């Protein structure tokens, strides 16, 4: 039992860490099942929550869409959401200049940017 849980967790972690884009729960389930065919959705949810709690993965939230997840230790980057295939893509680097225009007296701590459009496969 313990070993099976460890294997499931390792598989789910590897699926998220090796993906070239953030994955939602259904994506994770489909990919992890290639290695653990009898894996259930409840296990995927439970494992994702544990990986989040351990700071190994982070959520990528786009309003109105299922949450996707990516490895936590990526460099700062932005995301591109394809409105056709509903996939979230990672974009390299930062689109903002060095000084974002916040109101006077406001202190910026972080930012998130999501571009919306169609990916190369869908365009
Ligand atoms: Zn697309
Ligand atoms: Zn940025």
Image (cartoon, grey):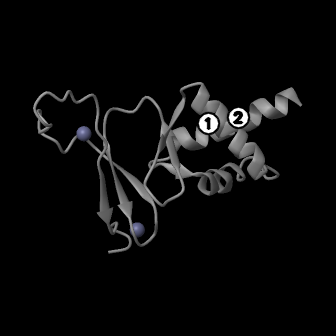
In percent of width and height, residue 9 lies at 70, 34
Residue contact between numbered discs 1 and 2, judged by CB atoms under 8 Å: yes
- In the picture of the structure, the residue carrying the numbered disc 2 is 9
- Which sits in the foreground, 10 or 97? 97
Residue at position x 28%, y 44% in the image: 92
Residue at position x 49%, y 59% in the image: 65
Other-residue count near label 2 (Cα within 10 Å), few / some / many at <14 / 14–19 / ≥20: many
In percent of width and height, residue 3 lies at 83, 28
- Which sits in the foreground, 4 or 79? 79
Specify whether 97 is left or right of 107: left
Q: Mark 1 and mark 2: span between their CA atoms? A: 6 Å
In percent of width and height, residue 64 lies at 47, 61
Q: Residue 21 carries which label?
A: none
In percent of width and height, residue 69 lies at 52, 44
Residue at position x 52%, y 41% in the image: 18
Instruction: Determine whether 24 is above or below 119 in the image.
Output: above
Q: Residue 13 carries which label?
A: 1
Q: Quadrant of the C terminus?
A: bottom left
């Amino acid at each position: 039992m313990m070993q099976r849980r460890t294997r499931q967790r390792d598989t789910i972690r590897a699926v998220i860490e090796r993906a070239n884009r953030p994955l939602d729960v259904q994506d994770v389930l489909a990919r992890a099942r290639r290695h653990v065919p009898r894996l259930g959705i409840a296990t995927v949810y439970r494992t994702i929550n544990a990986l989040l709690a351990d700071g190994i993965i982070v959520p990528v939230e786009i309003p109105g869409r299922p949450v996707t997840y990516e490895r936590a230790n990526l460099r700062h980057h932005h995301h591109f959401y394809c409105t056709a295939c509903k996939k979230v893509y990672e974009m390299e680097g930062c689109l903002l200049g060095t000084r974002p225009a916040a109101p006077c007296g406001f202190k910026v701590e972080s930012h998130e940017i999501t571009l919306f459009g169609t990916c190369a496969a869908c365009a």
